[in-house]
Image (cartoon, grey):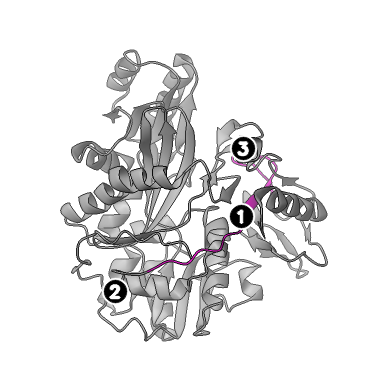
């Protein structure tokens, strides 16, 4: 057992989002909102609960539909999702993606007296607005890069001339994980600023932007289950954002990940907890936000110490595909404890195995890519290997086809990281699709340290 609970935290949230119920009375009917690999992983983990709950998903994908009923309700249809939860007599809703959270789905579920795991709209602003998050980080002196905030072109260009390159340009709003440009030259930086503020590269999301100094080091993803001022840190992982091998090409929503990230030693994790996680959770509460959900903290491990890159307010994708398979703890019990205000004292049990996930994308992602290519899956998978569906659908002939940029997540759980990598890549090679593309170096940094 690995115990990652921080016992020194203050009392649980007393806000309206927390439902006071006995943690032993786990919900019997659950709605998972979303359609990606993260949601497929959540569905599988919830189905594995000893309580054997009934699970449904909206809108789901072709893989999820093979396991649970799916309702064709879009993630941005808040009224439709609430109506679905009422119709299906759902006792608990787990929200996967950021869009419904930012649109206030949790607020509406709470108003309908339906328990939910996922922050209300005020908490979702921590992801929906990078400017809002940065201001909190600076206000509470949580380690982060220096930055400027801009909505006009000329001041932004003038600020650029005072900074060193590389430099990071971030669209303020939601951009499906692709609203970040790491400019290697001043010309690239100026072009990115012009495209966001004067062009339509990210639409309304880019009409306000953040210009940050570039941080150097390795990244790690820290996922934290939060209920007010109480929290549980989940196993560490390391994502691969760039589309190409060797961390080349444009940023994506994530091309693969592995867990644990051994670069985060126990001593370093304790420092991250002390300097970043605990101050972040308390800062959010001090701002009057009754946060119940996952706080995803992207961290750069710099030479001077860990520094916050970003907050997200939901499970990461594809981090979820390696973190949840490593949990021995019943995921439903964990999320329900958070939603019911009984997270204090919760102990997390983690499997010792390593997990590695390779994202299979459509060629051209994150830019232009085709949909509708038939996917031919291996007839069998070795023990420990799971294929999570992300951008998939069924065509008129009933075949599973590509239906997004990131199509599948191939996850392997094994005693060592090399074994997990070998198993995951063997499954990737055994899977056939005309537009199949994936990185060949997921986990390379840790594998090369051995």
Distance from disc 1 to disc 3, alpha carbons, whole Å, reads 23 Å
Q: Position of residue 255 (x, y in %)?
A: 60, 45
Distance from disc 3 to disc 2, alpha carbons, whole Å, reads 40 Å
Pick the quarter of the image with the C terminus.
top right
Residue shown at 45%/58% (left/top)?
97
Q: Is residue 253 visible?
A: no
Residue shown at 48%/16% (left/top)?
185
| Numbered label attached to residue 336 | none
**Residue range of the region highlighted in magenta in the rendering:** 347-370
Closer to the camera in the image, 245 or 152: 245
- State the predominant SS element of the stretch in magenta: loop
| Numbered label attached to residue 354 | 1
Q: Residues within 10 Å of mark 1 (few under 14, many from 20)?
A: many
Q: Which residue is mark 2?
A: 342
Q: Which residue is mark 3?
A: 243
Q: Mark 1 falls on what kind of element? A: strand
For marks 1 and 3, the one nearer the N-term is 3
Q: Mark 3 falls on what kind of element? A: strand
421 to 248, vertically: above or below: below
Distance from disc 2 to disc 1, alpha carbons, whole Å, reads 29 Å
Residue 352 lies within the magenta run: yes
118 to 249, vertically: above or below: below
In this view, the residue farthest toward the top is: 161
Residue shown at 53%/84% (left/top)?
52
State left or right for residue 333 relative to residue 63. Answer: left
Q: Residues within 10 Å of mark 2 (few under 14, many from 20)?
A: many
**Nearer the camera: disc 1 or disc 3:** 1
């Amino acid at each position: 057992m690995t115990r990652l609970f921080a016992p020194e935290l203050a009392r649980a949230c007393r806000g309206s989002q927390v439902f006071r119920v006995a943690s032993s009375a786990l919900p019997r009917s659950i709605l998972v909102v979303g359609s990606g690999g993260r949601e497929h992983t959540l569905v599988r983990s919830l189905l594995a609960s000893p309580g054997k709950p009934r699970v449904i998903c909206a809108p789901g994908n072709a893989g999820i539909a093979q396991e649970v009923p799916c309702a064709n309700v879009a993630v941005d249809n808040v009224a439709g999702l609430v109506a679905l939860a009422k119709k299906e007599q759902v006792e608990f809703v787990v929200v996967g993606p950021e869009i419904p959270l930012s649109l206030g789905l949790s607020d509406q579920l709470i108003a309908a007296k339906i328990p939910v795991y996922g922050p209300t709209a005020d908490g979702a602003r921590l992801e929906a607005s990078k400017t809002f998050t940065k201001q909190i980080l600076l206000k509470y002196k949580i380690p982060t890069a220096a930055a400027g905030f801009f909505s006009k072109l000329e001041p932004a260009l003038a600020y650029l001339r005072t900074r060193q390159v590389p430099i990071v340009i971030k669209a303020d709003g939601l951009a499906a994980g692709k609203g970040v440009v790491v400019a290697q030259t001043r010309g690239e930086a100026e072009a990115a600023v012009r495209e966001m503020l004067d062009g339509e590269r990210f639409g309304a999301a880019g009409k306000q932007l953040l210009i940050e100094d570039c941080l150097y080091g390795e990244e790690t993803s820290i996922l934290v289950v939060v209920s007010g001022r109480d929290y549980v840190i989940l196993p560490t992982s390391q994502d691969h954002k760039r589309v190409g091998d060797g961390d080349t090409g444009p940023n994506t929503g994530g091309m693969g990940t592995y867990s644990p990230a051994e670069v985060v030693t126990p001593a370093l994790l304790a420092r991250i907890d002390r300097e970043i996680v605990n101050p972040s959770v308390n800062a959010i509460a001090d701002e009057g936000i009754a946060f119940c959900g996952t706080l995803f903290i992207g961290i750069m491990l710099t030479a001077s110490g860990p520094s916050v890159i970003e907050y997200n307010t939901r499970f990461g994708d594809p981090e979820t595909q390696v973190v949840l398979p490593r949990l021995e703890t019943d995921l439903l019990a964990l999320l329900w404890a958070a939603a019911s205000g009984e997270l204090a004292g919760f102990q997390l049990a983690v499997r010792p195995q390593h997990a590695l996930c390779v994202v299979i994308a459509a060629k051209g992602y994150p830019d232009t890519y085709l949909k509708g290519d038939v996917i031919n899956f291996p007839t069998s998978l070795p023990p420990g290997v799971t294929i999570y569906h992300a951008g998939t659908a069924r065509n008129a002939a009933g075949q599973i086809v590509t239906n997004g940029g990131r199509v599948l997540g191939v996850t392997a759980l094994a005693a060592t990281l090399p074994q997990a990598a070998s198993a995951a890549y063997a499954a990737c090679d055994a899977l056939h699709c005309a537009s199949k593309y994936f990185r060949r170096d997921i986990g390379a940094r840790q594998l090369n340290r051995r």
